Image (tube, rainbow, N blue to C red):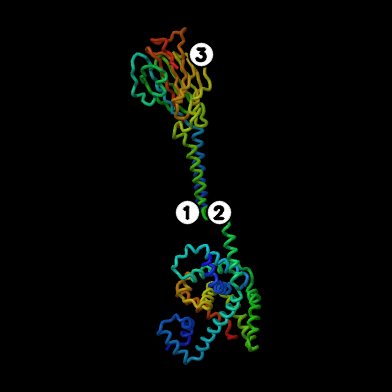
């Protein structure tokens, strides 16, 4: 025979129909003969009944159409294109993603700026030619030439015909035929 | 290390590391501590129709000079300190002095002097792209002319 | 949208009842109930049918209500004030005037006693009392085991009995 304390702890579950058959039968039998436990059962039932009727009465005052209009309003409001875009942006640019977006951008920028070091001639145009800042040929004739195809700057010294320098075998061809 | 589980902290650390790396790379590039200078001394002549295989890769630069043959006489590398001077022996009693001046926009300014028997033949300051070159030619030698390819790489 | 309207029609009062039981404030409960259906509308695509629709909706409702409770700054007496209109309306239909007074006092104290429970204990009492949901369903809604539901219910009922013993 279970004691009343034990029984009262199970009355709630018994009322809820959550006990197995054997346990349920044992409580039913006890309640038939115990006033105190029967009183406990009645109290629980009253609490449930009053709570249910109170809230039910309140809920029955909620008419469907005004409630539905409120829901529609929320649905309509939240799906404006601006709100959608904002929500998508918030979902995409979370802090954890942004945490990597910034350094990733810096890395990309660095790679672009460093490209020239690793890919010679990456930047086309005048920059790939050597530029002559100053020149002093000590009175000799000098030609400054640019080969467009190879992007090469050529400084060509002409022979000093008055000096003691060696002369080429074919003087006519000692200068490049530009 | 628990601090680094926090994404904002990860962002801060990563950004800091990247910024320092960028600054270091940028600083290294702006102020190279030395320049690797390479001088290729080439003899261009019209006695034959030979192209030295050792000059592979330079055809586009040399062929327009319209000589029939090109032969590599010597190639010399020197690591010249920034603001320092490198001297290269050139056939025919000549000498080439190269002095890196500055480095900006990935271009190296070189002060170049060619002397012959200790007398200056030409002084020039040329800005070349990093790892690029320019040609200095014309001094006669052994029936042909010398063509000097002067290239530089910032270190 | 038409089928969703039908779902709202079927469940809106039940959802409101559960939320009112948790929030004790009519206006807040109405707002949270409407928000519940907005969320359900948005997430309807992700409802896989693993649980029944009503336990899925109640889960949304209970979570929103618990969040709202944490934000609620009004004191518990507001609940009694907002419920006064309901109690008065109910009294008009009662026959025994003494029973009216007794019931009104019991209701007021019941509501106060429920309000003193934690959100989790309130949730189990309301879901069980109003909906008669099984412990399994309640556990699914609240994200806890059946054993936890049972023990929370037992605790909540014991507290209510102790506070209301003079009226019961």
The answer to whether the residue labelled 3 contacts the one labelled 1, judged by CB atoms less than 8 Å apart, is no
Depth check, front residue: B122 or A90: A90
* Parent chain of label 3: A
Residue at (60, 66) in percent of width and height: A70
Give left or right: position of B119 versus A72.
Answer: left
Residue position marked by numbered label 3 in the rendering = A138
Question: Compared to A116, does C10 lie above or below?
Answer: below
| Label 1: element kind | loop
The reply to whether discs 2 and 1 touch (Cβ–Cβ < 8 Å) is: no
Of badges 3 and 2, nearer the viewer stands: 2
Please tell me whether mark 3 sits on a helix, a strand or a loop. Answer: loop
Mark 2 Cα shell of 10 Å, populated few (<14), some (14-19), many (≥20):
few
Q: Position of residue C164 (x, y in %)?
A: 58, 83
Residue A143, horizontal then vertical, whole percent:
49, 16
Rendering coords of residue C158 (x, y %): 53, 81
Q: Nearer the viewer, residue A66 or C163?
A: A66
Number of residues whose C-alpha sits closer than 10 Å to that of mark 1, classed few (under 14), some (14–19) or many (20 or more): few
What residue appears at the point 47 percent right and 40 percent down from the top-left corner? A111
Task: Say which label, 3 or 2, has the lower sequence index.
Answer: 2
Q: Give x and y (percent) for residue B152.
A: 45, 27
Residue on which disc 1 sits = B1
């Amino acid at each position: 025979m279970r004691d009343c304390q034990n029984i009262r702890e199970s009355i709630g579950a018994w009322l809820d129909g959550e006990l197995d058959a054997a346990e349920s039968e044992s409580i039913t039998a006890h309640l038939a003969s115990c006033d105190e436990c029967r009183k406990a059962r009645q109290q629980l039932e009253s609490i449930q009944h009053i709570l249910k009727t109170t809230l039910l009465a309140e809920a029955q005052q909620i008419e469907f159409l005004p409630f539905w209009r409120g829901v529609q309003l929320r649905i309509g409001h939240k799906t404006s294109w601006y709100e959608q875009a904002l929500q998508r942006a918030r979902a995409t640019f979370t802090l954890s993603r942004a945490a990597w977006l910034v350094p990733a951008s810096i890395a990309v920028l660095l790679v672009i700026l460093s490209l020239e070091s690793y890919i010679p001639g990456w930047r086309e145009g005048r920059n790939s030619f050597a530029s002559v800042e100053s020149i002093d040929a000590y009175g000799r004739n000098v030609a400054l030439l640019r080969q467009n195809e190879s992007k090469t700057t050529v400084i060509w010294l002409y022979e000093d015909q008055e000096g003691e320098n060696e002369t080429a075998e074919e003087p006519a061809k000692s200068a490049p035929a530009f | 290390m628990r601090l680094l589980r926090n994404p904002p902290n990860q962002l801060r650390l990563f950004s800091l590391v990247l910024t320092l790396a960028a600054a270091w790379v940028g600083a290294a590039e702006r102020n190279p501590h030395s320049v690797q200078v390479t001088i290729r001394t080439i003899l261009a002549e019209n006695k034959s129709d030979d192209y030295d295989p050792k000059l592979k890769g330079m055809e586009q630069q040399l062929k327009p000079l319209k000589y029939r043959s090109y032969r590599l006489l010597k190639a010399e590398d020197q690591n010249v300190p920034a603001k320092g001077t490198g001297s290269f022996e050139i056939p025919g009693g000549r000498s080439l002095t190269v002095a890196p001046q500055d480095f900006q926009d990935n271009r190296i300014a070189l002060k170049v002097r060619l002397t012959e028997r200790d007398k200056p033949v030409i002084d020039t300051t040329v800005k070349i792209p990093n790892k690029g070159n320019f040609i200095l030619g014309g001094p006669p030698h052994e029936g042909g002319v010398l063509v000097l390819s002067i290239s530089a790489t910032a270190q | 949208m038409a089928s969703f309207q039908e779902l709202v029609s079927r469940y809106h009062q039940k959802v409101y009842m559960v939320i009112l039981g948790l929030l004790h404030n009519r206006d807040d409960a109405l707002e949270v109930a409407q928000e519940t259906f907005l969320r359900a509308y948005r997430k309807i695509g992700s409802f896989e049918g693993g649980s029944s629709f009503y336990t899925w909706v109640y889960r949304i409702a209970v979570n929103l209500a618990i969040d709202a409770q944490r934000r609620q700054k009004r004191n518990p007496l507001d609940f009694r004030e907002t419920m006064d209109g309901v109690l008065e309306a109910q009294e008009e239909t009662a026959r025994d005037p003494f029973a009216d007074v007794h019931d009104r006092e019991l209701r007021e104290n019941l509501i106060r006693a429920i309000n003193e429970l934690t959100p989790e204990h309130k949730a189990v009492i309301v879901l069980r009392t109003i909906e008669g949901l099984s412990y399994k369903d309640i556990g699914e809604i609240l994200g806890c085991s059946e054993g936890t539901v049972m023990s929370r219910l037992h605790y909540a009922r014991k507290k209510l009995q102790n506070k209301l013993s003079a009226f019961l």
